[in-house]
Image: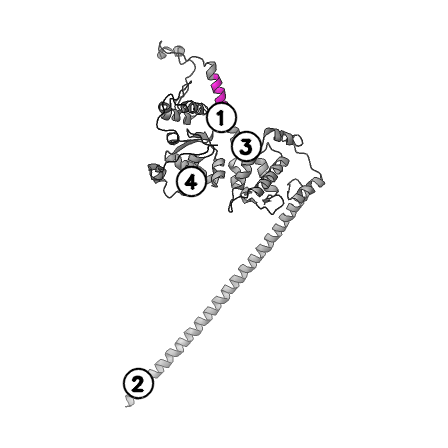
Amino acid sequence: MRDYSKISSSFWTGETGKKLHGDLSTQVIALYLMTSPHANMIGVYYCPLLFIAHETGSPIEGASKALQRLSEEAFCSYDSTLEIVWVHEMAKYQIGDKLKESDKRVKNIQKQYNDIPNCPIKLNFYNRYSDCFYIKNNKPLRSPSEAPPKPGAGAGAGAGAGAGAEVEAPPSSTQLIQDKSQNSLRDSSLEKKKNAPPDLISSSVKTLSWDRETKHGWVNMKGENFDRIKDAFPHLTRDLIRNELRSIHLWLLGNPPNSGYTNWFGLIAKCLNKIPADKIEEFQRNESVDQPPREKTPEEYAALRAEGWYDSRDPWVQADMKRMVEERAAADIITAERMKKEKEEKAAKKLADKARWEASLVKFQALVEEDKKERLAKEENKQGEVEEK
């Protein structure tokens, strides 16, 4: 983890900074990419969306949209398969415009460059900074648009290929070792992505919260939510997940989060991804993930319920869920009947109001006619008196 990062004040007044004015979420993600604890001085590093969402407090959807906006503004590039990000000008601001070949940092830059798996980001970074930092390639890189040479495309491809065509030499042992190392890094990145699927973000796990006053700390950790976490981490046993949730609860008691913190799934997923392999194997001895789990005894289920855990395989929990479904169905019927009755009463009241309005209208028209007759009679009397005079 880096101790500090350099950020130029031109971030706010530069061309890209001006384009991001008013887009606060994208500005936060841009600052995070430059100051991330996972970053390095060349600006090319492993950065899954889950890390960004958890450490900035943004939803996965928001982080994804911000990355897309930053890519469109040429601030960074993101490889969604390898989950690698490249902040284009980060190396310039962290290292400098150009180094001397004798500078000790050149060796470290070369090492970090060699750790990047073969991908378009690596090629573009080489084209941008190879002359500035004396980066060397032991094996030529191809751009994504360049297809690899077809077998027989050399001298034996036919008369049209020409006699002077050269056949590519077989790879050296050094190149094979480098390819193996790069494939290992790529497989590691894909494995990390597999262990933290983002599909849970849209599920009801978003309703999880933590409360220090509860038995195990987690609110709404019902069977359904727990099963979804288990499905997201199939290589972990249920007992191990419960054990880690207890550990997270104890840690939170000593390190209480800020008020308003809601990204509990990000915290849980990050902790579950860091469980050591030997600890996973220890729990797998009692419960194999490749076979149906051992059925717990009623006493074991009762002990879990007493602690606040509700396992969906517990017959008591299943009966309680069935009762809740039946009660909800009965409540829905009562609600439907009440709404129907209210609708009928509302329609009857509307008809009664209409009838009263019509009766009032008839009465008003009658009064108007009577008043009209009285006025005509007064005018006739007045006219008769005038004639008599």
How far apart are the alpha carbons under marks 4 and 1?
28 Å
- Residue 385 shows in this picture: yes
Q: Position of residue 314 (x, y in %)?
A: 67, 41
| Residues drawn in magenta | 176-187
Q: Earlier in the sequence, mark 4 or mark 3?
A: 4
- Pointer 4 residue: 28
Q: Earlier in the sequence, mark 2 or mark 3?
A: 3
Answer few, some or many: residues within 10 Å of disc 4's Cα (few below 14, many 20 plus, some between 14 and 19). Answer: some
Q: Are marks 2 and 1 in contact (CB under 8 Å)?
A: no
Name the residue at 51% across, 28% down: 190
Q: Residues within 10 Å of mark 3 (few under 14, many from 20)?
A: some
Q: Earlier in the sequence, mark 2 or mark 1?
A: 1
Mark 2 surroundings within 10 Å by alpha-carbon count, few (fewer than 14), some (14 through 19), many (20 or more): few
Q: Nearer the viewer, mark 2 or mark 1?
A: 1
> What's the amino acid at mark 1?
Arg
Q: Position of residue 65 (x, y in %)?
A: 43, 38
Q: Residue at left 45%, top 40%?
A: 62
Q: Earlier in the sequence, mark 2 or mark 4?
A: 4
